[in-house]
Amino acid sequence: MVVTHKTYGEGTIVKSDDKYLTVSFLCGEKHFAYPHCFYNNFLEIKKDINMNNKFLHMIQSVIFGHAVGDAVGGPVQFQPREERDRYPVTDMMPLYGQSLPKGAWSDDTSMSLCAMDALTKHGLDFDAVMENFRKWLFGNEFTPTGKTFDVGRACFKAIDRSRNGNEAEACGCHGEYENGNGSLMRIYPFSLYLYRFDFSLDEKLDLIHRASALTHAHPRSCIGCGIYTFILWELLENPTKQGIRDGLKRAETYYKDRHELYHYHRLFEDNFASLPRDEIKSSGYVVDTLEAAIWCLLTTDNYRDCVLKAVNLGLDTDSVGAVAGSLAGLLYGYEGIPEDWRNSLLKKENFEGIGKQFCEKLLS
Ligand SMILES: [Mg+2]
């Protein structure tokens, strides 16, 4: 961002926090830095800086909210609900079966980091996203321990197809029985990226659908990612339960002529949040995962309870936890995510770094 100082003229902000900023000025052919200057010297830009810091904070809350939900749910993935009723999860814990320490995250987070890294470096280049998916799946990159584990069937098929020189957008799975949550669980980087861009609503949703279609190309998965995106966009503006309801309303209006919307009809009914737990499924089917995540968001009032409620539904606990956790991060803010859970995440510094670079890309 370019700012003006009455003595030094035009400068570019290179660093800022709540009180100070460092500005780089061009003086003749040379740059010089003006470090630690009070906002007061730049009163006219204080509002923008605060808004940018707030946006960075919100992005970090989605990234951490998502990864923490994944890490809390991972150790009990695919165990039945009855097991959770007997032994409820109350904290983040290690994944004993695979000897993974507390704070390990899975494919949901790995694929999201792949997307964020590609968007930061290359913009909306789906081939670059797919290349990162390959680095993850076959090269052990973007993993918490240096070893890839946990990949869904459709994701594997699509990424494997891309190895034969196929364009990324030609690799996704189209079958009705290939509507797992594998695109919903990694869509948030695209939702955040498109929020800031000056495209029409149709263009933005088309890009969300294409991002889903890299692995999950059936309209049901694409629409699921669209509904999630509408909610995330509303929560960026209005982080309240009403924001969730407004996002659902916008999604319902936008997709009203799409037959596939029928599969999500319960989300738009007034009594959705009042449905008993027995009627909320938490499988890896995209509709079940989105319903479970939103139901947990609407029926709890803090991050910890929301993620634990999601995980204790059983079955696809890491993905339901991740999807619910990403939106709960926005709803309750970064500080609302328990500090010990945030600090336990493996490679925590990577999240902070990738989030900051991603944010800088969006603000540039
Ligand atoms: Mg997973």
Image (tube, rainbow, N blue to C red):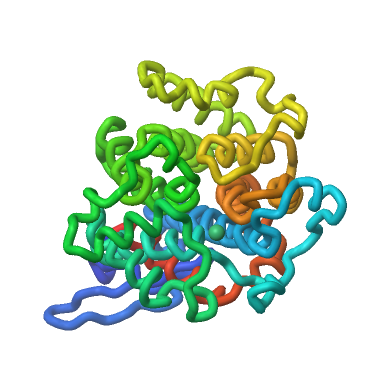
Q: Quadrant of the C terminus?
A: bottom left
Q: Quadrant of residue 11?
A: bottom left
- The answer to whether one can see residue 46 in this image is no
Query: At 57% across and 33% down in the image, what residue appears?
Result: 244
Residue 231, how many percent across, how many down?
Answer: 50, 36
Looking at this rendering, what residue extends furthest in the left direction?
Answer: 29
Closest to the observer: 11 or 145? 145
Residue 14 against residue 238 in the figure, above or below? below
Q: Quadrant of the N terminus?
A: bottom left
Residue 134 against residue 87 in the figure, above or below? below
Residue 282, how many percent across, how many down?
Answer: 64, 42
Image region (quadrant) for ligand 1: bottom right
- Residue 330 falls left or right of residue 359: right
- Residue 30 falls left or right of residue 74: left
Q: Quadrant of residue 153?
A: bottom left
Query: At 43% across and 64% down in the image, what residue appears?
Result: 113
Residue 131, how many percent across, how many down?
Answer: 28, 66
Figure label count: 0
Query: At 39% across and 69% down in the image, what residue appears?
Result: 137
Residue 119, how many percent across, how many down?
Answer: 31, 59
Query: At 73% across and 49% down in the image, what residue appears?
Result: 80
